[in-house]
Image (cartoon, rainbow, N blue to C red):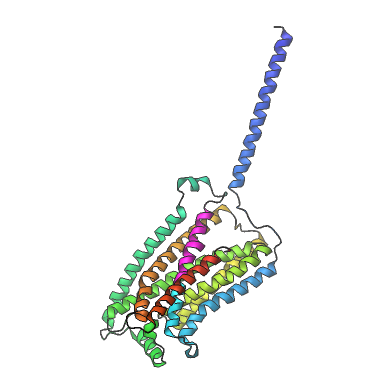
Amino acid sequence: MSENETCDALLSQYELLRGKLTTQHCDDNHDGDKDEHSHGDCGGSNGPYTVGLHVVAIFVVLLSSFLGTLIPLAGKHVPCLRMNPFLFVLGKCAATGVVLAVSTIHMIHPAAELLEEDCVPDSWKESYDAYAFLFAMIAAIVMHALETQLVAMFASDESPSSPSGGNGEKGDANGDEERADGAPSGDIYQHHHSHVPASVEGGKAHRLLSALFMEFGVTLHSVFIGLTVGITSDAETKALLVALVFHQMFEGLALGSRLADASMRISLELLLALIFSISAPLGTAVGVGAVVGSKISLTGVTFIIMQAIFDAVCGGILLYLAFVLMLSDFPTDLRKHAGVGAAHRGWKRLAMFVALWAGAGIMAGIGKWL
């Protein structure tokens, strides 16, 4: 082989090797860009964004939330608005269905979907594929242990102080006032009679804790729902706003029913109702501020994971409450209002089940848009 042929062969091999190295380098850069993109911001909303529309949404959601929570409380405290005892029971049944649907369809399921987003690191997806359900299960277990201990503590602390069989001064005052007005408060807002002190105090503590746990769950959930509305485009906001109004209205009815059933002071009831009512508008306001200021990323990986964890935990809390209400309050009301010897027993039993199913069904339907 001549020197020229040898040089040509070496040059040919050099060009071939350089081409391969260049191609590999470009591919590596492309993959790096993909990885960087996949672990950056999650997909946001596209389209025009009007601050005025989102400000209107804040006040509309605030009104619907407060109105939904206020209706059951007004029925308890305002004589002219006081409803038939069985109508209040139907409201409680519907509220139980709402809580069941909110916990599963509006919280736990979206949490699982968020953790499957492309922007979530593979370490989350590959290490365990059921984190949302794990967090929900842990929350339910913790709530069970916490409620059991707190109810026992309340019962042991209160029962010695009321040997005559009362519920305490406040409980008796409220109960006597409502019975004097003709409203069967002992039947509606209390599940036990005063001649069993330990049972009364245990039941009162159970209802109080259920109301407080529900307040925590739906309030935190509503903040993230409000954030979603605050960062979406105008077209998406209009669709979300309709669903959110009904969502907050029914969640407010559910929460208000539990607050009315917990035998609290009216000032505390109104405070808790107000806290829930401003939760979603507060989230929306934060979202609007983030979009306008562009200083906070509400589509980043950290925010998405945090939202998923909080949704899963709150969903577990509400799922536990839903089954406690279904297995405890519902059978008690069923025996009391549609038991043996009750008038129209069959129709009342059917109405209670239909109310439960309707509450769950309506919120499940709203879950298609929210």
Indicate whether residue 95 is drawn in magenta.
no
Quarter containing the C terminus: bottom right
Q: Which residue, as the protein is rendered here, is positioned at the far top?
A: 1
Q: Which residues are magenta?
A: 96-116
Q: Residue at coordinates 35% horizontally, 87% vertically from top-left? A: 172
Q: Is residue 259 visible?
A: no
Q: Where residue 161 appears, x then y in whole percent?
A: 28, 82
Residue 86 against residue 212 in the figure, above or below: below
Q: Where residue 4 appears, x then y in whole percent?
A: 74, 10
Relative depth, front residue between 368 and 43: 368
Q: Is residue 161 visible?
A: yes
Relative depth, front residue between 259 and 245: 245
Q: Residue at coordinates 40% horizontally, 72% vertically from top-left? A: 210
Q: Magenta stretch mostly in which secondary structure? A: helix
The quarter holding residue 177 reads bottom left
Q: Is residue 12 left or right of residue 205?
A: right
Q: Where residue 170 appears, x then y in whole percent?
A: 37, 85
Q: Which residue, as the protein is rendered here, is positioned at the far right?
A: 4
Q: Is residue 239 left or right of residue 135?
A: right
All told, the count of numbered labels is 0
Indicate whether residue 111 is drawn in magenta.
yes
Relative depth, front residue between 243 and 232: 243
Q: Where residue 253 appears, x then y in whole percent?
A: 50, 76
Residue 98 against residue 341 in the figure, above or below: above
Residue 254 against residue 178 in the figure, above or below: above
Q: Which residue, as the protein is rendered here, is positioned at the far bottom?
A: 180
Quarter containing the N terminus: top right
